[in-house]
Amino acid sequence: MEDPIKESLSRGVEKVVDQENLEKRLKSGKILRVKLGIDPTSPNLHLGRCVSLLKLRDFQNLGHQAVLIIGDFTAQIGDTSDKDAERPMLSEEQVSANLATYVEQISKVIDVSKAEILYNSKWLSGLPFLEVCKMADVFSVNQFIARDLINRRLEAGKRVSLREVLYPLMQAYDSVVVKADVELGGVDQWFNLLCGRDLQKHLGQEPQDILVTPIIEGTDGRKASSSWGNTINVLDTPRNMFGKLMSIKDELIIKYFWCLTRIEKERVQEFENMLKKGHNPRDIKLELATEIVSFFYSRDVALKEREYFIEVFSNKQTPSDVQEFIPSNYEILTFLVESGLVSSKSEARRVIAQGGVRVDGQQVDSPEFKLSKGQIVQKGKIKFFKVS
């Protein structure tokens, strides 16, 4: 079995700074303060966010102190590290609503009873402007605009606000306040994490080591993003989570295994070899979906959803437990919207045009279609309703 320290520094890891120093500190027996910051920019945590959370769990399992910062202040400001356009500011009320269940969601991944959970409004909201200026003096605008996405926006003539320049400073100050020994984050956070090292050093602290995790793609192959609606969420029902996992692109299967599960290295390599030899990706994906749903719910629940998926999609049967819905009228557009299968009639028209709606197994070709009582309406692969 691989050394747990080496495993933690390699599995689901893009790069580490300073690798040699961090490995030495981990072997020293000292309890390290391992920081991860999450901004509640939407109500749902998704699997893309869970890559770093799982890494924080790894450090907990090694006996280190997890320091989780919920960025209730920085979420209002907005980090555009991974955006090709300016992120709008959020109101305090929006952020408050977003973080309502954050700790509950996070508890599905890490042991929150043993973690320090802090909110950065506690120290950032009252920070004197003179102190901001003193810390800002550590960094140059040149460093900020040299970043790839920012540079591309400037070259395209897009606006870059002064507020965006200040965000990395705020994240860096979080590291100073909590005296972080290690900071975790996605690879798109690289610049912000380095700023934490620089500011700590400037203020007389030992600079934090950095461990960055890969970006996880969502159900459509693009970066998982709540704003794109391509995420697999922590609070998804087991059925939706299983179905979404079965819909990811085949080339992402092994990446999901490495980054979002902790099954043995040898087993992941076995799956990888099976795919290379032409094994049906669906079979490997069934193992992946079972593993992840088991983690967030239970093995029994995951196996039940696996059976359901095979019954409905492999054997092309209508599920026996279809939920009934009573619409205000029997027009297909109305039914799709009122049942929650789509968010608007325009989306309903688009899904119909793309061949994504079936009634009693037959594809619906017209938005003028009229339903009858007792029919089964199917949207996509995993959503069914019976007209009542």
Image (spheres, helix red, strand yellow):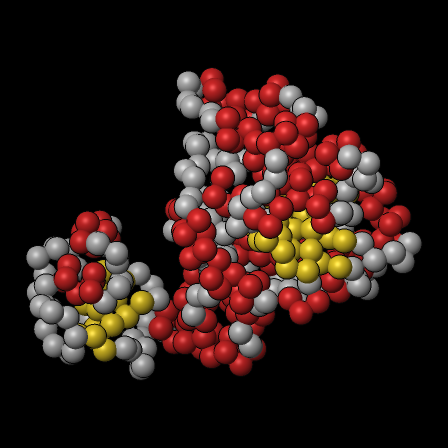
Report the residue at 53% width, 81% height from top.
Answer: 300
Nearest the viewer among 224 and 45 is 45
Q: How many labels were placed on the picture? A: 0
- Image spot of residue 208 (x, y percent): 77, 42
Q: Quadrant of residue 186?
A: top right
- Image spot of residue 26 (x, y percent): 85, 53
Report the residue at 28% width, 70% height from top.
Answer: 384
Q: Quadrant of the C terminus?
A: bottom left
Report the residue at 74% width, 62% height from top.
Answer: 60
Nearest the viewer among 351 and 151 is 151
Q: Is residue 366 left or right of residue 56?
A: left
User: Is residue 35 in view from this perspective?
Assistant: yes
Q: Is residue 373 left or right of residue 195?
A: left
- Image spot of residue 247 (x, y percent): 43, 58
Instruction: Kindly give the residue lying farthest to the right in the view shown.
Output: 28
Relative to 145, residue 78 above or below: below
Relative to 143, residue 288 above or below: below
Nearest the viewer among 152 and 173 is 173
Report the residue at 57% width, 22% height from top.
Answer: 145
- Image spot of residue 97 (x, y percent): 42, 57
Q: Quadrant of residue 86?
A: top left
User: Is residue 230 in view from this perspective?
Assistant: no
Q: Quadrant of the N terminus?
A: bottom right
